[in-house]
Amino acid sequence: MPGQGNSQDALDAAQIAALVRKLVDVPNELVTAQLRLCSLSSNNPLDLLEAKQTIADACDHLQSAIADLTDAVHNLAELSALDAKRSTSIHVGTDTYYGAAP
């Protein structure tokens, strides 16, 4: 079907853009969890309930980051499999993204 490759490429690009937006949030979630946990080691004593809440908040941020990362990896793997099946598309391997640092 003429033009179908272009619409599929646009769909793939939109899916990749959505995944990138998710991945951009992962470091923020991890840093937030780290800062929450670091507050436990400060010189300011916390009561037990406050410490438990701090740990629970950090766990929520970690779970969110892990979920976003897992979702993005699975979706990118699916997109890669689709690209490998389409002979008209240009496949970009992970080596393109993970080359040696300058």
Image (tube, rainbow, N blue to C red):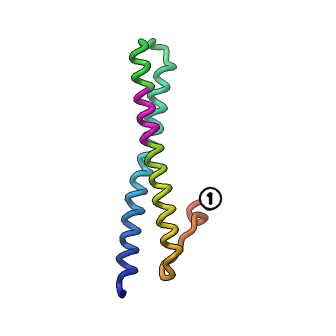
Q: Within the image, what quadrant is residue 95 found in? A: bottom right
| Image quadrant where one finds the C terminus | bottom right
Residue lying at 46% horizontally and 55% vertically, measured from the top left: 72
Q: Tell me residue 36's x, y (percent).
A: 44, 28
Residue lying at 43% horizontally and 20% vertically, measured from the top left: 52
Residue 35 higher or lower than 5, as above or below: above
Residue lying at 36% horizontally and 72% vertically, measured from the top left: 10
Q: Tell me residue 96's x, y (percent).
A: 58, 66
Q: Tell me residue 40's x, y (percent).
A: 48, 20
Residue lying at 39% horizontally and 16% vertically, measured from the top left: 49
Give the residue type at disc 1: Pro
Residue 60 higher or lower than 15, as above or below: above
Q: What stretch is highlighted in magenta?
A: 56-64
> Which one is in front, 99 or 4?
4
Instruction: Find disc 1 in the rendering and name its residue.
Output: 102
Q: Is residue 57 magenta?
A: yes
Q: Tell me residue 7's x, y (percent).
A: 35, 76
> Which one is in front, 49 or 30?
49
Q: Is the magenta stretch mostly helix, strand or loop?
A: helix
Residue 42 higher or lower than 76, as above or below: above
